[in-house]
Amino acid sequence: MLQLSIIVPTYCEAENLTVLIPRVNRVLTEAELDAEIIVVDDDSPDETIQVCEKLAENCPLRLITRKNERGLSTAVIAGLNAASGGILLVMDADLSHPPEKIPELVSALNQRQADFVIGSRYVEGGTTDQSWGWFRKWNSRVATWLSRPFTSARDPLAGFFAIKRQTYLKAHQILNPVGYKIGLELIVKCRCRNVVEIPIEFTDRVAGSSKLSFKEQLRYLKHLKRLFDFKYQNYAYFTQFALIGLTGVFVNLQMLALLSNWMISPIAVALAIWTSMSTNFLLNRNITFSYARHKPFLKQYLSYCGSCLTGAVFNWLTTMVLSRSFQFFEKRILLAAFIGILVGMGFNFLLCRYLVFSK
Ligand code: GDD
């Protein structure tokens, strides 16, 4: 088996590739690494394809051209799936990542029992480009900080990393990243525990332009939610369900305050409950259980109402049983009611998760 596959996603990188590929090739020869370079291009309108064809005459370069798809992460996955090396390494084409560090990343995987190796900007010895202003620095730091629930690595959002083929194969069928952060996706889904970071000097591109738009950054938040659901499963669903339940309290009280000015209170209370139940349904359908969003709306809505009613009945029963059967709760009716709320919410959650919003 080939020792190493280097995957380079590209979109309009003709100018950079003419410098990068010979530099990578030199490093591979000097380090005596038996490797292939896979460029995954999304049918760039510049000269990227022609440049690759020319470079392939002297380098172990393979070009994959995707005609109908766009996106950094999916391009990387296409490259990883097509690779035949025992070690899979990913890097940008824009010369941000020093190819001279490739042998160090490879030997860290081989010798330090690492599951995942990052060419890192944020460990001692690593640097970002001098030209970065405070906004870019903070932007990068905040995005990195948001990845804390998933890994203790200092730079899990880097695009320069390596993973063993056998580790990648553990999860290659369940990868579905949105946006740019394929490295983080791999760390989480391939369950990489030992992540080693090698310091690198990150330099900003000179030629071409970054494709990392504001929209991509918003997609990162969506990606984080997906990873949260994946890693923490029912805890994640329950947390979101409970937080949405809390927003329902505010909707209910606001509606009640609004309606009670011009209608009799039993109807106002009923309308306030119905409104908060409906907003909770919409939020749960679109956020907590978004995986079931494609299912018929009305059927889901009606069964959600049924589930809320069941939760309310369990709430009532628990409060009654506690306050009537246990002396301790006789004088602590609020505590009994609170436990009732928790039990009702628990039942409601289970019904939602496994019936109303079943996969
Ligand atoms: N095939 C393909 N399709 N490649 C793409 C696409 C795409 O839609 N978008 C970007 N690329 C390629 C670029 O050509 C480049 O080789 C690499 O992916 C990085 O893209 P840039 O647009 O230059 O990213 P950046 O420099 O702003 O972002 C960097 O920082 C992030 C961490 O903050 C990159 O290093 C990212 O990989 C990294 O996640």
Image (cartoon, rainbow, N blue to C red):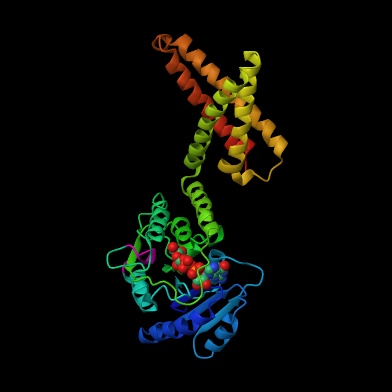
- Please provide percent x and percent y for residue 288: 56, 41
Where residue 270 appears, x then y in whole percent?
A: 64, 19
Residue 80 magenta-highlighted:
no
Residue situated in front as seen by the camera: 107 or 294? 294
Compared to 203, does 182 lie above or below? above
Q: Residue 295 sits in which quadrant?
A: top right
Residue at the image position 33 percent from the left and 62 percent from the top: 122
The answer to whether 9 is drawn above or below residue 249 in the figure is: below
Q: Left or right: where does residue 126 sit relative to residue 319?
A: left
Residue at the farthest bottom position? 58
Q: Position of residue 106 (x, y in %)?
A: 37, 73
Magenta highlight on residue 118: yes
Span colored in magenta: 112-122
Q: Which quadrant of the figure has residue 48?
A: bottom right
How many marks overall?
0
The one of 113 and 199 positioned closer to us in this rendering: 199
- In the rendered image, the residue lying farthest to the left is 124
